[in-house]
Image (tube, rainbow, N blue to C red):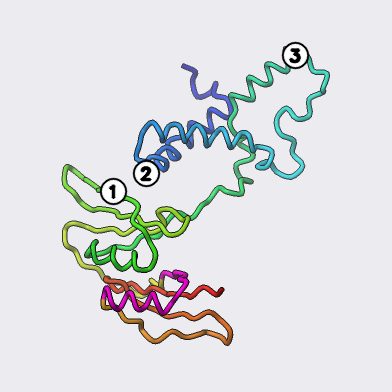
Amino acid sequence: MCGPETLTPGASLRARHAKTIYNYCFRRVGDCAAAEDLVSIVFLKAWRRRDLLLPPGKEPPGSSASPRTSSATGAARTADTRRRVLPPESVAYCPAMATFLHTMVRITDPERSRGFYEALGFRFSNEMDIVREGELEATNYFYSIGEAENVLELTYNHDGRAYELGTAYGHIAIGVDDLDATLAALKDEHGIDPERPPYQVREGGSRICFVRDPDSYRVELIERRG
């Protein structure tokens, strides 16, 4: 096995980031083999799109070679290219380096919270138990909405603790197609009323209102305009 000093740039990059990517993929798919396959796909796609990740004016590795390069030299360059996944100098220029994943709030009644958020259009995705020293400490419930997967995480701690909302939290905003129908469903199915009737912040703007979930988190509902 080669030592750290002999790693190619791509191998070094993979060694630094593969574990993080694997952990993320495993949380999404829940399967070790599938997660490993996804890691390989991520690095392969990054290499194929390397020309989009380089600083302006910088040539991709091997792009300035003469068309008359010998076949032996070309084969060697191709082999080296396959070993390198992503040039390290391009990392700072990656347009998709950061991605919003989810918001987490702590809850005291998973079933009540599930009913509330499903009434707003969320769908339950999966759950994950947190076990420490053999004891079930918490369960994380993930919810998706539209094409956005697992963007809401509801955490239930099994020790029965209560929470103080504090003054820093503001609200979660959710777009709905029919504000009146959504409010009616919240009232009929969960006994939840809005803080005040729907209103417009400015003339011609979208109708909005605020409700509170079963743990009193404030949620803004914004009616989508057709």
The front one of 199 and 162 is 199
Which residue type does callout 2 highlight? Answer: Arg
Q: Residue at x 58, y 36 (%)?
A: 45
Q: Which residues are magenta?
A: 172-190
Label 3's element? helix
Tag of residue 71: 3
Q: Mark 1: which amino acid?
A: Met
Label 2 and label 1: CA atoms lie apart by: 9 Å
Q: Amino acid at mark 3?
A: Ser
Residue found 29% across the figure and 74% down from its top: 216
At 33% across and 74% down in the image, what residue appears?
A: 185
Instruction: State if disc 2 and disc 3 touch (CB < 8 Å).
Output: no
Q: Quadrant of residue 133?
A: top left
For disc 1, the marked residue is 128
Mark closer to the chain start, 2 or 1: 2
**Could you classify mark 1 by the number of other residues whose Cα lies within 10 Å: few (under 14), some (14-19), or many (20 or more)?**
few
* Drawn side of residue 136 relative to residue 91, left or right: left
Judge from the rendering whether residue 81 lies leftward or rightward of residue 129; answer left or right. Answer: right
Within-10-Å neighbours for mark 2: few <14, some 14–19, many 20+: few
The residue that mark 2 highlights is 27
For marks 3 and 1, the one nearer the N-term is: 3
